[in-house]
């Protein structure tokens, strides 16, 4: 795993980004898929390992990885995505540079206490957009050579 990790509270981001919130109103899986695609692109553009955590409905927490993509966790019964984010920060915070993306202030405080940097949903949107723009600029430069 990369020494730099971006941990994303998936539903916090979905409800904060207007375009994802609209998708979620139509069908929740559409919003999750759009967020996962944006985060996969971000990982590809930056080389920062991305982990998305979603509230799930299963009996046990599950861990899935998209092929050549990001790592995804779904919380199990009796736990929330916040619980998983906090557990991951507590476990890996001393060994990796972790940034937590959430607009949940309590979760930010807890993650900060374990040594993580925190950004809001808007801060994540800005990073994703900047990475995409930088990638597109690099493609244009490369295409003109």
Image (cartoon, rainbow, N blue to C red):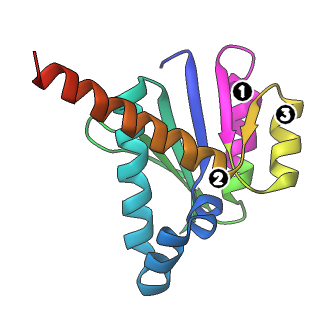
User: Which residue is found at the position 65% from the left and 66% from the top?
Assistant: 77
> Pointer 2: residues within 10 angstroms few (<14), some, or many (20+)?
some
The label nearer to you, 2 versus 3, is 2
Residue 116 vertical position relative to residue 22 in the rendered view, above or below: above
Q: Secondary structure at mark 3?
A: helix
Q: In the shown orientation, is residue 80 left or right of residue 75?
A: right
Nearer the N terminus, badge 2 or badge 3?
Answer: 3
Nearer the N terminus, badge 1 or badge 3?
Answer: 1
What residue did someone put label 3 on? 112
Q: Are marks 1 and 3 in contact (CB under 8 Å)?
A: no
Q: Secondary structure at mark 1?
A: helix
User: Which residue is found at the position 68% from the left and 39% from the top?
Assistant: 100
Q: In the shown orientation, is residue 142 left or right of residue 132?
A: left
Locate the C terminus and report the quarter of the image it occupies: top left
Q: Which residues are magenta?
A: 84-100
Q: Which image quadrant for residue 26?
A: bottom left
> Pointer 3: residues within 10 angstroms few (<14), some, or many (20+)?
some
What residue did someone put label 2 on? 122
| Residue 95 part of the magenta-drawn span | yes
* Label disc, if present, on residue 91 of the rendered structure: 1
Q: Position of residue 9 (x, y in %)?
A: 63, 52
Question: Whole-Å distance between the Cαs marked 2 and 3?
Answer: 18 Å
| Residue 29 part of the magenta-drawn span | no
């Amino acid at each position: 795993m990369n020494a730099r990790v971006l941990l994303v509270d998936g539903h916090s981001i979905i409800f904060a980004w207007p375009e994802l919130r609209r998708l979620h109103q139509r069908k929740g899986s559409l919003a999750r898929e759009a967020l996962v695609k944006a985060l996969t692109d971000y990982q590809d553009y930056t080389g920062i390992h991305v982990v998305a955590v979603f509230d799930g409905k299963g009996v046990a927490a599950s861990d899935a990885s998209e092929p050549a993509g990001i790592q995804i966790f779904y919380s199990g019964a009796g736990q929330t995505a916040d619980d998983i984010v906090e557990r991951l920060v507590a476990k890996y915070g001393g060994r990796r540079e972790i940034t937590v993306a959430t607009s949940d202030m309590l979760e930010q405080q807890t993650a900060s206490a374990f040594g993580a940097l925190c950004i809001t949903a808007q801060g994540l949107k800005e990073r994703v957009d900047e990475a995409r723009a930088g990638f597109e600029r690099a493609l244009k430069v490369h295409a003109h050579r």
